Amino acid sequence: MTILRARGVVKSYGPTPALRGVTIDVAEGEILAVTGPSGCGKSTLLHCLAGILRPDAGEVSYGEHRLDTWSERMRARLRRTEFGVLFQFGQLVTELTAAENVALPLLLAGTGRREARTAAVGWLDRLGVADLADTRPGEMSGGQQQRCAVARALVTEPRVLFADEPTGALDSRTSEQLLGELVRVARDQRTTVLLVTHDVQVAAYADREVALRDGAVDASGLGLTAVQGRHGR
Amino acid sequence: MSTAHVLLGLLAGGPLHGYELKRAHDQRLPQAKPVAFGQVYATLGRLQRDGLVVTAGQAQEGGPERTAFQVTDAGRQRLDEWLAEIEPPAPFVSSTLFAKVAVAVLVDGAQRARDYLVAQRAAHMGRLRELTAIKTDPASPLGDVLAADFAILHLDADLQWVSNTLERVADLHREVQP
């Protein structure tokens, strides 16, 4: 079953086109990698599918809902309840402890403080960082912070996790561990994952890959729209 | 890679007969091409001829009689030399991938090379996914994980080359056109 769908999505930043009519389907429960070089539009596509950005043209659907026709308020509510989002870095609130950070989405959704704390610590445990529950982000390594960010993205048990270069700031060993955990937990929870990356090693954690190039899906993998002489010799 | 040196190394731990050697090889070097029995015995024959191994008695446990081999001092010395030897970084591009692209461009032009590269990329990505699954399986022994890692990094290098070449194959075609 298709859970996310983009149809002819177009998005520009001022005069600069980022997406030139992208059509993709994401099946429920699949881990899909969206790959391509810097500037190919992959992050913009993630933002459109997650309802963070509204496309200039084209359709974005989540199940039966046409997100491109929804107000920002409705999309924000959907993001809080159904989606989890994970970025490269800078997502944790530095003044809060790990457990408080992870509990935040639950508190915003109206869960009681004690219950939210219990769930948060449970998720930190699942990501192997329960001992950091009362530690602030500033005292953690990059890998530990990112594990907390994964816990926070999953604490509401979202149906879809949007991850934009989630290991971009980590060394390769830490990156592998985090991706291994992320994929394992996502499969256990049957969470759909949209994984944006420029790195083929990261893309290999996914079930399937969609390559973008110059704001469009590159149907045969990579490079069919190769720009002749682009890099000189 | 030298099968003879690997077998010497496996024998350094104590005498083994041919079948045990094959098993030890395939177990200690997971993801490597399994060594054939014939190759094990042929290699043992050469090592024995050169004085690097000697027979170490015969065992018969319900099955056929088997000859065990053990490494000699000369064998141990040869092994140490091999382990201390630095492998030269490959001096020439010897990849079939590169040869196919060069020939495809010559024979049929840029599109033929591109078609090949796109198909090869898909095959490489498929293998990369399989190896990543081995690597992330908590039940995988460390030997398998390290072997998978080795292959993953090499495939990654190939894939980067494939992507770069896809972009530049038209230039290559112009360069080789008469």
Image (spheres, coloured by chain):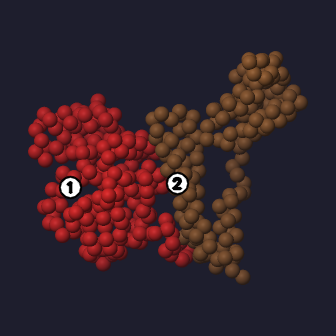
Chain colours: A red, B brown
B132 left or right, relative to B170: left
Please give the residue where the numbered disc 2 appears in the rendered image: B126
Most extreme residue toward the front is B62
Which residue is depicted at the point 35% across and 69% down?
A23
Q: Which of A184 and A138 is in front in this view?
A: A184
- At which x and y percent is residue B109? 64, 77
Query: Which amino acid, by three-letter code, is at mark 2?
Result: Gly
The reply to whether residue A87 is in sight is no
**Chain identifier of the residue bearing label 2 in the image:** B
Position of the N terminus of chain A, as image quadrant, is: bottom left
The reply to whether residue B178 is in sight is yes
Indicate whether A228 appears above or below A83: below
Query: Which amino acid, by three-letter code, is at mark 1?
Result: Arg
Which residue is depicted at the point 58% across and 40% down?
B147
- At which x and y percent is residue B90? 70, 52
As drawn, the label of residue A79 is 1
**The residue tagged with tag 2: helix, strand or loop?**
helix
Most extreme residue toward the bottom is B178
**Chain identifier of the residue bearing label 1 in the image:** A
Which residue is depicted at the point 61% across and 41% down?
B31
Foreground: disc 1 or disc 2: 2
